[in-house]
Image (cartoon, rainbow, N blue to C red):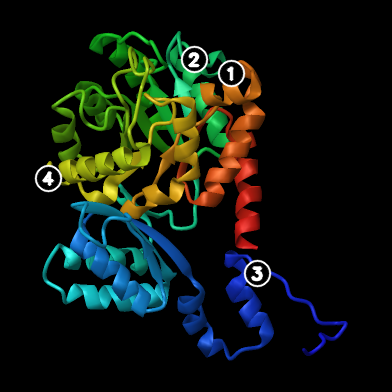
Amino acid sequence: MPVLQASTLVVKIPPSEILREVERVGVDPASLPIFYRKSDFIALKIYDVLAPAANIIKQELLSAGADAAVHRNVINCKVERSDVVVFGTAAQLEKVASKLEAMNYWALPEVASEIKRFLKRERLLLKVKDKTLDLTDRVLLMGILNVTPDSFYAGSRVGEVEAAVARAMEMVEEGADIIDVGGESTRPGAQPVSLQEELRRVIPVIKELRKRTDVLISVDTYKAEVAKAAIEEGADIVNDISGLRFDPAMAEVLARSDVAVVIMHIKGTPRDMQKNPYYENLLKELLFYFRERISFAEEAGIDRERIIIDPGIGFGKRFEDNLEILRNIEAFKSFTRPVLIGHSRKSFLGIILNSPPEERLEGTLVVTAYVAFKGASILRVHDVKENLRAIKVARAIANA
């Protein structure tokens, strides 16, 4: 057996560093794209595949040098359907998708199309009025402006118009890309406010803020009349916690405008959402929810490029649900839409830290750095300056 020289050393290369290390070896630069396709290891989950199709997918992957995990009874078709977890490099998946595309049965062309769509790695573009923002490698900060007396974090509450605008301008100076103006608390157990009261709280603030800054303004509402009035006063985004479900007129208002929209997932309403929420399969339920909601919005006349999705941290979620969402940011990126995460000072951090909202900044910053690294596009936060610093460090590491 040959003896390694004293200077020889074998080390494991993290996936993110493979191409960098290949380049350092001194290969021909023209070959880098080839190595990229061969080294870019990808795992995809395909839900609810017919058993015969699952068998074919697995066999085609094996023949390409890749693999797939399927239900143990797929081989004898004792189950009708199975989820399929696919493992392989980009090159292997491209090859298999091309073969599946030609098999016009058991929805295999649809599977092939979805795999190819994922492999295209389209740029992440968001249309907001006459602007197109490229969020492929960018994270936006949405500063929270609660024009309410009862939001869960007292430090975010502001009263009259001048105080609210002053706080908003302070967040703009600190680096906020978006100011999210809300006139109704959506904390667990919160009671709804009347349409007139919500209009009284938010519209004067948006009107005055629009005069003072070009920063994007978001209105946090699920009421169509509030959204309509806010858009008329210059709002750029409607942040609807209900995912266009609480007010039937909301989709029509948005379709007639050119603003962006945040479609959030919530189970129940703010009044009852934390009363024993339960999920058989959290991730699957959220992903199918967003597929249906995006389709609904498009059919209503809302351009896909204007849609942002928000999995709804703390909105009808248990402690463990919130953590599962944060671990799986990449799954929500499958829709090629910006993912918004609203984690700032929320109760799941209080459980971890055993602390009230006023003492959850450090926990918030850890989550901010983590989800920025994992690919979230917009972070809704109370503390703009501190979160911006956390993002800068996370991005510096990711892009070094």
Tell me which label, 4 or 2, sits earlier in the chain: 2
**Residue displayed at 81% across by 85% down:** 4
Residue in the picture at 58% in, 91% down: 28
Label 4 element class: helix
Circles 4, 2 touching at the beta carbon (< 8 Å): no
Instruction: Find residue 344 and name its label.
Output: none
Q: Which residue is mark 1?
A: 357
Disc 1 is placed on an element classified as helix
Q: Which residue is mark 4?
A: 299
Spatial CA distance of label 4 from label 1 is: 40 Å
Measured in 3D between alpha carbons, the distance from the residue under mark 3 to the one under mark 1, in whole angstroms, is 40 Å
Q: Give the mark, 3 or 1, whose residue is nearer the N terminus.
A: 3
| Badge nearest the viewer, 2 or 3 | 3
Q: Quote the CA–CA distance across marks 3 and 4.
A: 46 Å
Q: Position of residue 15 (x, y in %)?
A: 58, 66
Q: Position of residue 240 (x, y in %)?
A: 30, 30
Mark 4–mark 2 distance (CA, rounded to whole Å):
36 Å
3 or 4: tag closer to the N-terminus: 3
Say whether residue 329 is visible: yes
Q: How far apart in space, not on screen, are marks 2 and 1 (Cα)? A: 8 Å
Query: Which tag is nearer the camera, tag 3 or tag 1?
Result: 3
Q: Quadrant of residue 293?
A: top left
Q: Is residue 277 above or below residue 70?
A: above
Q: Amino acid under label 4?
A: Glu
User: Does label 2 or label 3 sit earlier along the sequence?
Assistant: 3
Residue corresponding to mark 2: 152
Q: Nearer the viewer, residue 327 or 75?
A: 75
Q: State the mark number for residue 13.
A: 3
Q: Position of residue 267 (x, y in %)?
A: 31, 25
Q: Are marks 2 and 1 in contact (CB under 8 Å)?
A: yes
Up the image or down, 106 lies above or below 346; here it is below
Identity, as a three-letter code, of the amino acid under mark 3: Ile
